Amino acid sequence: MILYFTGTGNTKFVAEYIADHVGDDCVNLNDVLKFKRPLRFNSVKPFVFCAPIYAWRFPKLIEKVISRAELTGSEQIYYIATMGSQTGDFEYSLEKLAYAKEMAYMGACGVPMPNNFINGSELPTPEEAEVKITASLPLMKTLSDRIMQGAMIEKFDDTPFAGLASGTVNYMFNRFFISSDKYTVSEDCVSCGKCESVCPVNNIKLSGSGIPQFRSYCIGCYSCVNRCPQEAINIGKKTEGRRRYSAPEYSDWKNEGKITE
Ligand SMILES: Cc1cc2nc3c(=O)[nH]c(=O)nc-3n(C[C@H](O)[C@H](O)[C@H](O)COP(=O)(O)O)c2cc1C
């Protein structure tokens, strides 16, 4: 069973590629979280958790989901991250989680995908994104093959001071950087409600006058900022005028013949 969490679609793309190649079910954890469905999953095939990297680690919320989930059937667990370029040592806490669940840790790997960290830097154009995703297709194939064979997977990216990045820096990031207070909504907002529907943690509610209101549960996926059709949501002044990013759909790429193996 392939279970994924996504902010802007990269992880959904990778999870759907793998599910299609190994012939397994794909579970959208955004829906599980949004609609507060039970964290109980049964699968005869290995569990493959897929999530984006936030500050050199899986999102804290997803680590919590994995820790709390009741997994029955298979006793094997794989982890696949999508990342701009560095995963730190994200596998360290995940390996411990697998052992705490008395499951076999089958390895972890980061797949380079277009960067969606909009308050960090300019995001890729659709053309640049396509080049990056295309370059990662062989890795998605290798990971699918190894999962099908029941073989371990290994990561290949390298982060200087990985322990520090995934430890102290990640802690500071979650503690001080992620905050709902920083969001602004411009007058371009047309109250379409897209932000409310894409927020995986129900952090956004439209007010009586239709203006998005942010509560205090933000996990920093930036789905609202990147997917607002009016580009009306910003993180302060930093992201104003910056290009937004949403991943292409795996099914479209397949239909268009861009997935060759
Ligand atoms: C809050 C935040 C923090 C991020 N931190 C990292 C990071 O530490 N290393 C990295 O390579 N990419 C980082 N990224 C980029 C994402 O991991 C990458 O674009 C990922 O594929 C997004 O997946 P999604 O489209 O499924 O949300 C970060 C993105 C966000 C939004």
Image: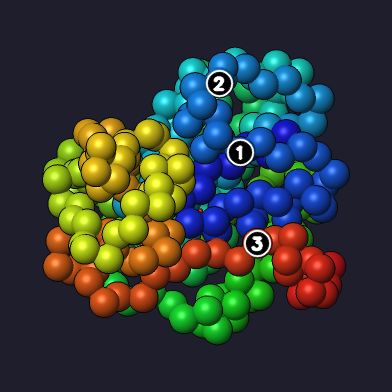
Mark 3 and mark 1: span between their CA atoms? 14 Å
Left or right position of 46 against 232: right
Q: Could you tell me which quadrant the N terminus lies in?
A: top right
Residue 63 in percent (x, y) is at: 44, 32
Circle 2: is it few (<14), some (14-19), or many (20+) Cα within 10 Å? few
Question: Is 148 or 130 nearer to us in this picture?
Answer: 130
Residue 93 seen in the current view: no
Question: Is 249 or 62 nearer to us in this picture?
Answer: 249
Residue 261 in percent (x, y) is at: 84, 67
Identify the residue position indicated by label 1 in the image. 28
Left or right position of 152 against 180: right
Mark 3–mark 1 CB contact (< 8 Å): no
Q: Earlier in the sequence, mark 3 or mark 1?
A: 1
For residue 168, above or below residue 187: above
Residue 17 seen in the current view: yes
For residue 214, above or below residue 239: above
Mark 3 and mark 2: span between their CA atoms? 25 Å
Residue 219 in percent (x, y) is at: 32, 41
Q: What amino acid is labelled 2 in the image?
A: Arg
Identify the residue position indicated by label 3 in the image. 249
Identify the residue position indicated by label 2 in the image. 37
Mark 2 and mark 1: span between their CA atoms? 11 Å
Circle 3: is it few (<14), some (14-19), or many (20+) Cα within 10 Å? some
Identify the residue at image location x=55%, y=29%: 32
Mark 2–mark 1 CB contact (< 8 Å): no
For residue 26, above or below residue 195: above
Q: Earlier in the sequence, mark 3 or mark 2?
A: 2
Which quarter of the picture shows residue 251? bottom right
Q: Which mark is residue 178?
A: none
Where disc 2 sits, the SS reads loop
Identify the residue at image location x=16%, y=52%: 182
